[in-house]
Amino acid sequence: MRDVLEQLLSVWRAGGTAGVATVVRTIRSAPRQPGATMVVSPDGTVAGSVSGGCVESAVYELANEVVASGRPELQRYGVSDDDAFAVGLTCGGIIDIFAEPMSRENFPQLQAVADDIAAHRPTAVATVITHPDPRVLGRRLVIGPDSTDGSLGSVRLDAAVTDDARGLLAAGRTTVLSYGPDGQRQETGMEVFVASHAPRPRMLIFGAIDFAGALARQASLLGYRVTVCDARPVFATPERFPGADEVVVKWPDKYLAEQAQQGAIDARTAICVLTHDPKFDVPVLQVALRLPEVGYIGVMGSRRTHHDRMDRLREVGLTDAELDRLSSPIGLDLGARTPEETAVSIAAEIIAQRWGGGGRPLTETTGRIHHDG
């Protein structure tokens, strides 16, 4: 929802009703993941996408229909349908779309949800997408780590969904949960879509150089909250790194240790060391490689620099098991030359490591294109 919030809030604040279509489930290969959203404004303008182009026209019409009728609807698109080619989903997958009219009346908490997302506070939105009673469809509950707002219809149901949604929120997962009609566990009849809006994953870039500027822009496109850190104030300025969310003047190892102590580093965090200077990169890598949970640790340098750095890291006591966590030299072999091309190669390695990709051309592979991790 993040990428469509601005347009959705514009309609909501004006007192209008938007048609909102959300991917709630995917089966086999699908171009967008659960949570991908399309918003259709009263004037017909569109924000977001649910299929990367495959079924956009059909979903656009569905969004307009639910606004006109005032009734939410769950619709499936895919090759199992007789009209699959008519709507254009030829990728071999199936997607379930929940379309609903959205306004101040049926989603009064939207501004609060947007505020939480902007402030990097975790929040989840649970919405009933199937139920024997059609009047229950579209009811929602907003869930934070220590709070709830709204109701799905009963105390029992709210309690069950709140407990499960907090677990999903902690893991950053968005999915559909099944219950009995009143929240009975181990039963069926009702489905609740839980959209987890966990804080954006972080990328910490150490070294205020031109490659850092290109990487900050690339990481921002991928949804990271980007910090550029360098001990040299003349280089570490916000003006030089407009793609970063923040620029910090501090010794890299001290800043990283502080962030870890504050619990601001997790399994989704990417750490990229671009300093090219042993007095910076060895101390910060010594901290990074001993952190229990980090999604990615990479360091830039030539082959010669790499071998010298590995010797220095062993000298300060790092083990082979700890060094195995390091991507050095950083990035995939794309033949990159410019800072922008190098940024793409680094981002590609992070994506491949996250989802289990091999980094080979798709023409050389078989099986599913989209990895589940």
Image (cartoon, rainbow, N blue to C red):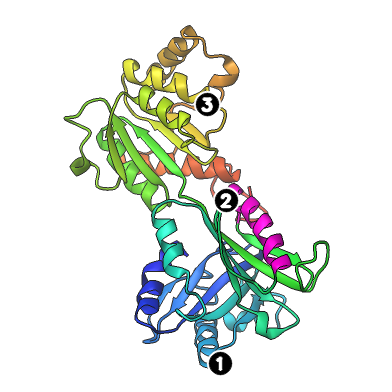
On residue 132, which mark appears?
none
Rendered location of residue 296, percent (x, y)? 50, 35
- Report the span colored magenta: 155-173
Residue denoted by label 1 = 69
Q: Main secondary structure of the magenta part?
A: helix
Crowd around label 1: few <14 · some 14–19 · many ≥20 (10 Å): few
Pointer 1 or 2: first along the chain: 1
Question: Magenta segment: does it hold 255?
Answer: no
Pointer 3 or 2: first along the chain: 2
In this view, 160 is above or below 199: below
Rendered location of residue 228, percent (x, y)? 31, 36
State yes or no: discs 1 and 2 in contact (Cβ < 8 Å): no
Under mark 1, the amino acid is Ser
On the question of residue 338 being in view, the answer is: no
Question: Magenta segment: does it hold 161?
Answer: yes
- Residue at 44%, 57% in the rendered image: 116
* Numbered disc 3: secondary structure: loop
In this view, 332 is above or below 329: below
Q: In this view, does 334 lie to the left or right of 162?
A: left
Pointer 1 or 3: first along the chain: 1
Under mark 3, the amino acid is Leu
Residue denoted by label 3 = 291
Q: In this view, does 26 lie to the left or right of 19?
A: right
Residue denoted by label 2 = 172
Rendered location of residue 317, percent (x, y)? 51, 9
